[in-house]
Amino acid sequence: MKAVELKNIVKTYALKKSSVTAVDDVSFSVEEGEIFGLIGPDGAGKTSIFRILTTLLLADKGNAKVLCNDVVKDWKTIRDIVGYMPGRFSLYQDLTVEENLDFFATIFNTTIQENYDLVADIYKQLEPFKTRRAGKLSGGMKQKLALSCALIHKPKILFLDEPTTGVDPVSRKEFWEILKRLKKQGITILVSTPYMDEAKLCDRIALMQKGKIMTIDTPEAIVNQFGKNLYAVHSESMFKLLNDLRSFTKTESCFAFGENHHLTLKEECTTELEKYLLASGHNNATIKKLEPGIEDCFMQLMKK
Amino acid sequence: MTQKEIVIKTNKLTKKFGDFIAANEITFEVYKGEIFGFLGANGAGKTTAMKMLIGISKPSYGYAQIAGYDVYKETELIKKNIGYMSQKFSLYEDLTIKENIHLFGGIYGLSEEQIKTKREALIDKLDLHSQADKLVASLPLGWKQKLAFSIAIVHKPKIIFLDEPTGGVDPITRRQFWDMIYEAAANGITVFVTTHYMDEAEYCNRVSIMVDGVIQAIDSPDGLKRKYNAQSMEEVFLMLARGAKRGE
Amino acid sequence: MKQLLTFIKKEFHHILRDTRSLLVLLALPIVQLLIFGFAITNEIRNSNIAILDNAKDETTQKIITKIENSKYFDIDRTLTTNNQIEEAFKSGKIKLAVVFQTNFQNVLAHTNKAQVQIIADATDPNQATTLANYANAIIMDYQNDLNETNKPPYTISAEIRMLYNPELKGAYSSVPGVMGMILLLISTMMTSISIVKEKELGTMEILLVSPIKPLMIILSKVVPYFVISLVNIATILLLSVFVLGMPIQGSLFLLIVVTVLYLICALSLGILISTVTESQLAAMLLSLLGLMLPVVMLSGYAFPIANMPVVLQALSNIVPAKWYIILVKSVMIKGLGLSAIWNEVLILTAMTIFFLFVSLKRFKIRLQ
């Protein structure tokens, strides 16, 4: 059984004068028990897909199923079995941590005690602040509370719409560790993120841009599709280096990438490049071959 | 190195909310034309510190001078000499691109003539001719942010403060955005930026990392990596921020 | 059931933790009632009046002095003929005229009865009644003074005439008006705001993607404001009876029944507004401009409906508050029973059912 199945989903929003196609003929499926990531920037259509799957939005075209339930016909069943964490922090700021959790437990016809083992892991970190109002928590804690609330009724599948956006690297790392443990308990997780570095933590990912899926596969397979040698170039003057690399005639693409610039060439000519850089005044430039990451792949696909 | 002109200077800058010390005796300097990365975990006190620096929050005690002006007495002068752009608020969505440029030009006290020239130059540079009369709401996020940045430096401020300017922006536009930051820095504008992307920390000349209201480390990215024996800024950050005690 | 209770508890948390708003909600009816009722009705001092003394004897002089000495009245002019009365009122300078019959003292002495006419400018009905009552009270006071020594007792009967608005329509209108307004304000505006707030916060998304039924969401939103409205009704009624001195003539039970009916109508309007707005601000503006304005302007609360242009009169028929205010006046002031008001009750019931149906129908189970 597929946990999630989308076929040719189209969703268009009417604006005042024009219309925007938020989801443009998207099809994919998620296996039970996997962590599936929708990776892409704002405006890629991730939130619309989540809302269609959680029965909050009706698609213009196509059909979708969640655990074999049709998102249009069987919306009531779906609402019983999924856990959903919307993109924004969507809890009651003026209720305490405990009140929030208790409220959502009751809404889902359960109690905190009943499913405590599932949330225990996360909730333990929140417990010291359980009488604090949710509005007074900071980013990482809020996300954890929201996740607890989405988990409290032991859903078979979790929809997490950009759970880590705006959250610092430490909290993000912890959050993903929690997701891995949930996966072990057999929960299917569909997650979206604008952070490319989180892609490698998913079992499979779809890279999305402007309502379309550019590619779907395991992170490793996507990296293997890169099909080009990628070089990390470094010198003392990085800004000048970027401009110089971009003006090099055989450069195909060059992007700043943290401490290095990532470069692909139209043909292999590293010795020529070394000379060119030396002539441009980069005395200590280093050129190293490296494994591409998801972000490299994403940018390569964007340019196609 | 000694001749570097200092544009931000703080000494034991502190902000307390009741018993809670949001920013605890922050002392640092930022030099002219520098790209300064201001990092920290959620709740470490970054926002509080930034608010004091741009003159919208009064420090509890301590000293800070921004572009040569005192944060207690000369907030109006500070505001005239800085630009500010955040992810949350940047432009008026229900105004057109031209109207936004006009509005902010006016706010920063440019003359009608200046605004006109700047506007054309800006639209040229961002290649927004076909969009110039459209509402900002219709632009993709990345373009909005690029436009917001250009507008924030339209009055040639001495310092530009950027609060998570690239959150949610696609990888290519994110890099184009940083190209603009580099250009502004090359033109002598000091850039003070916060970000959650650790690769962006590498683009900064120097970064500071705040933990529990205190600046734990401040140096160039290379310097920090050497000091903490780390491969990347992410490692450095995790090492420092993991030690955070504050229950967020 | 437990779901519903928890949900309602949560709504009460929201309301009780926002102390400032809660205080406004509870104090608003009191303040309004005091401003519209008490302050305007009782704080009339130094009103200019005219005296037409056709007797000019000792008794009338004493009464006139007594009137003049009271803090309520200043004698602006003394008239000599009946024709001058109308003229004096038209000048707009006087609010009240006191007319003594000829041979006042003699008539009183021989027949034990004499007549005083009190004429009031009833364009402002509240003020007119109050002033007439003051004048009457002063005269009665004098009569009592006289009767301490006189047996059999004298009777000075005051005939009160209301000029320009003899039926005194709009009198006592402040209490029914405030009730119509406050209930609408709290029930409609607060309900719509609290539902739209969930949309704004994004929590509506989670609620929708949960087994809880939309009807439960609505019920939980409605119950707290229903309770607060009941508290307000109690406050208003207690104030009007014990502070404003306006007794409930008819059946209290009937009054409560029609009030609850009106409350349900207002609450369903609130739900309706929440289905067409996306922000708290929009919900507030729509409640204020779309509902409060018609209530104030068209319900007969501020301006008598009879004096309105025909178009507005027709329009006033679709304002629920109009019917409610009529009902409250009938039950509370006139003391009428159900048999006399079933027409209005029926209209209000029909409106309530209509709004309830439309709002429940329109409440979306999805985001769009």
Image (cartoon, rainbow, N blue to C red):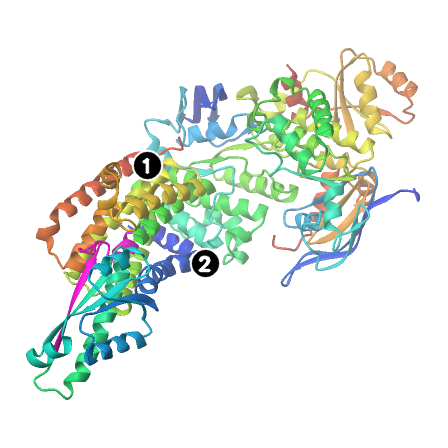
Task: Look at mark 1 in the image and give the residue it sits on.
Answer: C363
Which residues are the magenta region? Answer: C155-180
From the viewer's perspective, is residue A175 above or below residue C166?
above
Towards the viewer: B146 or C215: B146
Amino acid residing under circle 1 = Phe
Instruction: Please indicate whether residue B71 sits to the left or right of residue A139 in the image.
Output: right
Residue B152 horizontal/vertical position (percent): 70, 35
Which callout, 1 or 2, points at the residue further toward the start of the chain? 2
User: Residue C20's mark?
Assistant: 2
The single residue placed furthest to the front in the displayed view is C80
Q: Looking at the image, which residue is at 46% across and 21% down?
A: A12
- Secondary element under disc 2, as helix, strand or loop, is helix
Please give the chain letter of the residue carrying mark 1: C
Q: Is residue A156 visible?
A: yes
Instruction: Please indicate whether residue A203 sits to the left or right of residue C73 in the image.
Output: right
From the viewer's perspective, is residue A183 above or below residue B13?
above
Splitting the image into 4 quarters, where does residue C237 fall? bottom left
Total number of numbered labels?
Answer: 2
Residue C368 horizontal/vertical position (percent): 39, 30
The single residue placed furthest to the bottom in the displayed view is C149
